[in-house]
Amino acid sequence: MAGMQRLQGRAALVTGASRGIGRAVAIRFAEEGAAVAVNYNGSRDAAEETLEQVREASRRAGGPVERHRIVQANVGEEAAAQAMVEETVGAWGRLDILVNNAGVQSEAPSHAYSIDEYRRILDVNLTGALVCSQAAIRHYLSRPGGGTIVNCSSVHQLIPKPGYIAYSISKGGLGNLTRTLALEYADRGIRVNAVAPGAIVTDINAAWKDDPKARAEVESHIPMGRAGSPEEMAAVFAFLASDEASYVTGQTLYACGGLTLFNEFRTNWAS
Ligand code: NAP
């Protein structure tokens, strides 16, 4: 909602913010008053564009325009991921919100899935989130007031994804990462939650997003009858990152147009 300023004075690091959902989260956080660090891995130009849009949003909101930053790092590399969080904390002297959003996927039959590729996907989607969380938590524990983490999971935390075994495992793992960290640090002012998007119009869905026929096929499986937008995801991240969710921890909020509601049961066929 334009005009809400729930993140004023907060400093937030968003991984994978050069494009897609991460970019929308970065912009939304700036609209709500936060200083934002835009992480990217390969897409420098796109990340610069995100930064420009973040600054613009911040200008409109009267936010900290000069404090936003770009940080390059492959979150799948332990040392780089850790250094990124530590440098961000060092530059600002604080971090209040970590969003583990960076994610990749690839398709192959499970019996032929390359274990090197499996390791690469797990490194980015799951281990990267853990390494960044560790560094953020060390900072949160070092000061009064704690901090918060919001992970980007997927409906495939719950729904199997045949042909995408590494992705499916990584998102299942993120569910337990979220719940375990939430429980371990609940008494020290640290909240850990996740957003689980359904089918969202971003580059990761290049296979159907601009092809009307393929998109209609995808949307025919979604109870609400349409794909979601990155901005609709960003609204959920902003809620979970804000004090409005001050009593919420360990939860995965499915923002999926009803994909997790067993669409096959919409009409009765079983009795
Ligand atoms: P996207 O448009 O393909 O964007 C992916 C982002 O992740 C890019 O900014 C990319 O940055 C970054 N990234 C990839 N590998 C990275 C790495 N090793 N280190 C740092 N950043 C890296 O995808 P998206 O749809 O926005 O996906 C974002 C998250 O949402 C992912 O975790 C994905 O699993 C999840 N999700 C998406 C959907 C959907 O339908 N779109 C559904 C469920 C869950 P560079 O280009 O700079 O490398």
Image (cartoon, rainbow, N blue to C red):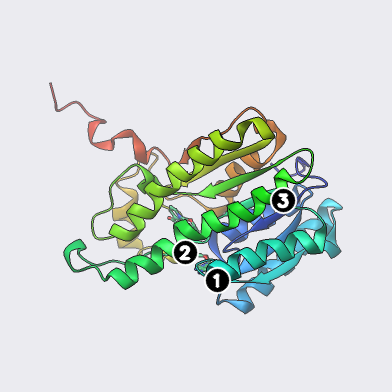
Instruction: Respond yes or no on whether mark 2 lies under 8 Å from ligand 1.
Output: yes
- Residue at the top extreme? 271
Question: Which quarter of the rendering shows the C terminus?
Answer: top left
Q: Nearer the viewer, mark 1 or mark 3?
A: 3
Task: Give residue 52's mark.
Answer: none
- First in residue order: circle 2 vs circle 1: 1
Q: CA distance from mark 2 to mark 3?
A: 22 Å
Which SS class for mark 3? helix
Q: Counting other residues with Cα less than 10 Å from the Cα at mark 2, is it few (<14), some (14-19), or many (20 or more)?
A: many
Q: CA distance from mark 1 to mark 3?
A: 21 Å
Which residue has dot 1 on it?
Answer: 74
Can you give x and y, in whole percent of width and height, for residue 91 in the image?
A: 80, 64
Total marks placed:
3
Residue 205 showing in the rendered view = no
- First in residue order: circle 1 vs circle 3: 1
Can you give x and y, in whole percent of width and height, for residue 84 in the image?
A: 66, 66
Residue occupying image coordinates x 50% and y 42% = 178
Which residue has dot 2 on it?
Answer: 124
Which residue has dot 3 on it?
Answer: 139
Question: Which quarter of the rendering shows the N terminus?
Answer: top right
Which three-letter amino acid code belongs to the residue tagged 1? Asn
Residue 238, quarter of the rendered image: top right
Q: Counting other residues with Cα less than 10 Å from the Cα at mark 3, is it few (<14), some (14-19), or many (20 or more)?
A: some
